[in-house]
Image (cartoon, rainbow, N blue to C red):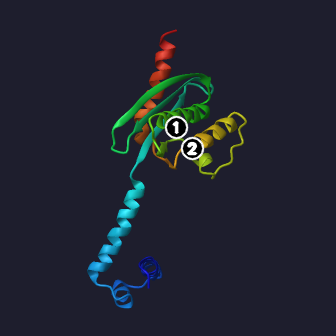
Amino acid sequence: MGLSVRRAAVFAALAQGLELPEILERFHLTGKELQSLFQEVSDHYRGGEEGFWSLYCDGASRGNPGPAGAGLVLYSPQGEIKANLGQYLGQTTNNVAEYQALILGLEKARQLGAKRVRIFSDSELLVRQLTGRYQVKSPQLLPLWRLAQKELQNFEAHAISHIPRELNHQADSLARRAIDQETSSR
């Protein structure tokens, strides 16, 4: 039995619920060989995780619509902050600001050479629309959703996750600061 076929058969047997002693006996493996097999799979998946940039993005609006801002923090795969910015967006809704923050972050990630990106947002609507769980019905959001989808195609891989607001405080603070700076300068 070839190595890749054997590997697949071992994992299929594990998936079917065979106990480890049965696996060892059926496939004539030593404990060390099985451990090596698990290490190989672990290394493979860990390698797939490497190279991901992390993008935290948030939009804010004072009033709905009202003065709005976008904030983002972009981390390299090594965990270094590579971008940390807020941008005033003018008068718009919070949902539009959320999309604009995402698009701004994706553009920045691409400019910095990111090939893989993990996106973190506290906007449940944005995350669910981008992952296909919700349809985009708003005529205001549809062009932004399309642009976000187009930007995502520039990456080899991407993932998007909803996170609690407390874990997105840096991006939120940058979005709010952009609003404050613009409105106080008037």
Question: Could you say which is closer to the camera, residue 73 or residue 152?
Answer: 152
Q: Are marks 2 and 1 in contact (CB under 8 Å)?
A: yes
Identify the residue at the far left of this view. Answer: 32
State whether residue 101 is above or below residue 42. Answer: above
In this image, 16 relative to 67: left or right?
left
Front residue of 186 and 76:
76
Tell me residue 103's x, y (percent): 56, 35
Q: CA distance from mark 2 to mark 1?
A: 7 Å
Describe residue 133's horizontal placement relative to residue 8 as left or right.
right
Other-residue count near label 1 (Cα within 10 Å), few / some / many at <14 / 14–19 / ≥20 = many
Residue to which mark 1 is pinned: 106
> Which quadrant would residue 38 be assigned to in this image?
bottom left
Q: Position of residue 165 (x, y in %)?
A: 45, 40
Which residue is at 35% across, 74% downward?
37
The amino acid beneath tag 2 is: Leu
Q: Which mark is residue 152?
A: 2
In the structure shown, which secondary structural element does the residue marked by tag 2 occupy? helix
Q: Please state the horizontal and vertical placement of residue 65, each as a whole percent of the image.
A: 63, 26
Q: Earlier in the sequence, mark 2 or mark 1?
A: 1
| Residue 74 placement: quadrant | top left
x and y percentages locating residue 77 in the rendered image: 37, 45
Q: Amino acid at mark 1?
A: Leu
Numbered label tally: 2
Secondary structure type for disc 1: helix
